[in-house]
Image: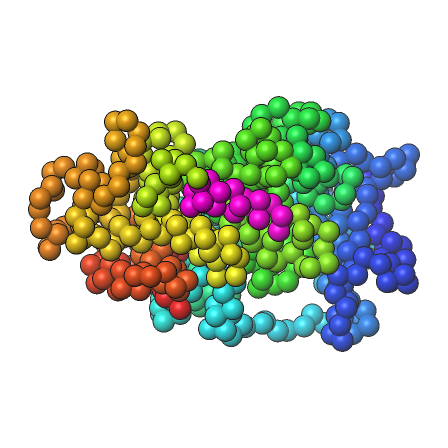
């Protein structure tokens, strides 16, 4: 039997004013870290620990505790899955029981518990136009009227999902699964639904899936710092690819999850902005930390934390996670400068290797990022992903993000603007294009790019040309990705993007009806 007794620790912290995260007229919150000890020997369990974010209302008359169970130390020997059941008592009275579960290694779960006076009956609603105008996220289309049937179906699917600790909820456990998925996009589908409706059913879905992501074995907490693993303290550590120094212990057991970066959602960012809960702040940090440490130390240049060694969509989503963490980690948090520096390191690398590369032959005159696996080709849609992430960074005022955005939009926006130069807009939502010739020299004209990749349309008039790629009638394919990218770049002030968005919108009218069912990519100009 393992026992954790955080109450005495909490009393000490209140008396000393330590571990205090919130301190205001309405509530005060303390974070208590409590080890589990063997009730017979008093020996600490090497892997299982509790973190309690305890919020006191009305001088402690009402207490909200976000109880977090973690099995995620990085360097302790013999990590693995743990099977247990849990009982939580307050002053001898049982307030929660958790039936037998198997807790994944490098994972965590949580449960919010209220004790004391009657629970407060309120729900915060944000002024969403202001929320979006803050540029904390992309400008989702608030004019959409989501049918109640869509929200009811969201609740039905969630109710039939496994939302127990370590359950996947609505996530696809095998991340490399290809094709459109609800979690893949600038923000997941359920988050877009919430931003547009603020409906409780969408909120429940968003938070349940964020909770499910906590069960994925990517959560490494450094025993030395008490924070998510960082490559500044451990420049040669590797959690996925490459040789790790120090070597990480091999865990026992398996999980249902296979995480990767190329098919990764934003899990904790928006839930933290909506709730302010420390659990979701930690989630955002854990995922960003893993995305950095998962890159081979050789390619990430050790402590620099570079992510260019991934395919481009993986770079995009990893960069998004680093940017999100650098934004929301409070200024006085010990990890703030870590994520800010890793973001700056990556943006500097992109700028130096693309727009400011002294070797002109090494950079596309259009602004295309090539595939690392086939250096003749570039994926327009993957470049769109990167462009979307860069719009958010640039709108946050980052000069290097702006420099990189200005460069890449020469390709991503440019392919919608150059019909006069021989590239028909109807072919803009392509899959893979050759961007170099047989000698691996970049094409320098839009006509050559078009004629090489669309030889069957060579010489044809652009007027009335059918859109044959990217599923222009759907909201979850390349044509929709491009439309969201054009909206975001229009908001970011990229020359020509506003006109390109308007024309592309007129060419994809059937997409509009679909957004009410799936607003994942329903981004419009600010």
Number of numbered discs visible in the structure rendering:
0
Q: Nearer the viewer, residue 512 or 37?
A: 512
Q: Is residue 210 visible?
A: no
Query: Residue 381 at x, y = what percent?
Result: 34, 45
Query: Residue 410 at x, y = what percent?
Result: 33, 51
Q: Nearer the viewer, residue 293 or 471?
A: 293
- Please give the range of residues in magenta: 340-357
In this picture, residue 122 sits left or right of residue 362: right
Q: Quadrant of residue 520?
A: bottom left
Which residue is at a point 75% across and 72% down the rendered structure image? Answer: 24
Q: Is residue 225 visible?
A: yes
In this picture, residue 188 sits left or right of residue 321: left
Q: Main secondary structure of the magenta part?
A: helix
Which residue is at a point 31% across and 64% down the rendered structure image? Answer: 498
Q: Looking at the picture, does residue 235 appear above or below residue 97?
A: above
Q: Looking at the picture, does residue 227 appear above or below residue 121?
A: above
- The single residue placed furthest to the front in the displayed view is 358
Q: How is the image coloured?
A: rainbow
Query: Residue 132 at x, y = what percent?
Result: 48, 68
Query: Residue 179 at x, y = what percent?
Result: 35, 41
Q: Quadrant of the N terminus?
A: top right
Q: Is residue 356 magenta?
A: yes
């Amino acid at each position: 039997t393992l026992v954790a007794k955080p109450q005495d620790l909490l009393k000490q912290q209140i008396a000393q004013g330590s571990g205090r995260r919130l301190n205001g007229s309405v509530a005060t919150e303390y974070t208590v870290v409590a080890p589990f000890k063997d009730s017979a020997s008093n020996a600490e369990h090497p892997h299982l620990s509790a973190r309690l974010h305890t919020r006191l209302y009305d001088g402690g008359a009402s207490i909200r505790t976000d109880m977090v169970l973690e099995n995620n130390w990085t360097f302790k020997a013999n990590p693995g899955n743990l099977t247990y059941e849990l009982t939580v008592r307050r002053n001898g009275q049982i307030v929660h029981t958790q039936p037998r579960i198997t807790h994944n290694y490098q994972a965590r779960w949580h449960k919010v518990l209220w004790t004391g006076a009657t629970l407060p009956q309120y729900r915060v609603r944000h002024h969403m136009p202001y929320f979006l105008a803050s540029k904390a996220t992309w400008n989702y289309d608030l004019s959409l009227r989501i049918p109640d049937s869509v929200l009811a179906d969201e609740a039905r699917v969630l109710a039939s999902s496994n939302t127990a600790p370590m359950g996947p909820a609505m996530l696809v456990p095998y991340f490399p699964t290809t094709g459109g998925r609800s979690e893949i996009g600038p923000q997941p589908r359920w988050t877009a639904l919430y931003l547009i409706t603020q409906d409780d059913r969408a909120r429940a879905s968003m938070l349940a899936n964020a909770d499910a992501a906590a069960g994925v074995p990517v959560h490494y907490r450094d025993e030395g710092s008490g924070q998510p693993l960082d490559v500044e303290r451990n420049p040669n550590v590797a959690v996925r690819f490459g040789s790790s120094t120090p070597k990480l212990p091999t865990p026992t057991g398996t999980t249902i999850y296979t995480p990767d970066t190329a098919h990764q959602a934003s899990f904790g960012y928006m839930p933290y902005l909506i709730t302010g809960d420390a659990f979701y702040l930690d989630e955002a940090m854990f995922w960003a930390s893993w995305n950095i440490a998962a890159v081979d130390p050789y390619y990430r240049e050790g402590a620099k934390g570079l992510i260019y060694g991934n395919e481009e969509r993986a770079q995009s989503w990893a960069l998004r996670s680093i940017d999100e963490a650098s934004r929301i980690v409070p200024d006085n948090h010990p990890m703030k400068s870590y994520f800010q520096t890793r973001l700056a390191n990556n943006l500097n690398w992109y700028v130096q290797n693309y727009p400011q590369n002294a070797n002109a032959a090494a950079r596309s005159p259009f602004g295309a990022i090539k595939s690392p696996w086939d250096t003749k080709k570039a994926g327009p849609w993957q470049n769109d992903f990167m462009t979307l992430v860069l719009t958010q960074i640039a709108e946050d005022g980052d000069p290097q993000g702006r420099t990189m955005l200005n460069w890449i939009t020469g390709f991503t926006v440019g392919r919608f603007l150059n019909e006069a130069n021989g590239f028909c807009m109807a072919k803009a939502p392509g899959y893979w294009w050759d961007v170099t010739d047989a000698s691996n020299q970049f094409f320098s004209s839009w006509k050559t790019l078009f004629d090489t990749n669309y030889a069957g349309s060579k010489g044809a008039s652009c007027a009335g040309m059918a859109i044959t790629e990217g599923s222009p009638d759907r909201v979850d394919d390349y044509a929709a990705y491009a439309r969201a990218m054009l909206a975001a770049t229009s908001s970011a002030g990229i020359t020509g993007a506003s006109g390109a968005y308007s024309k592309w919108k007129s060419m994809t009218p059937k997409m509009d009806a679909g957004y009410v069912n799936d607003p994942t990519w329903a981004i419009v100009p600010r």
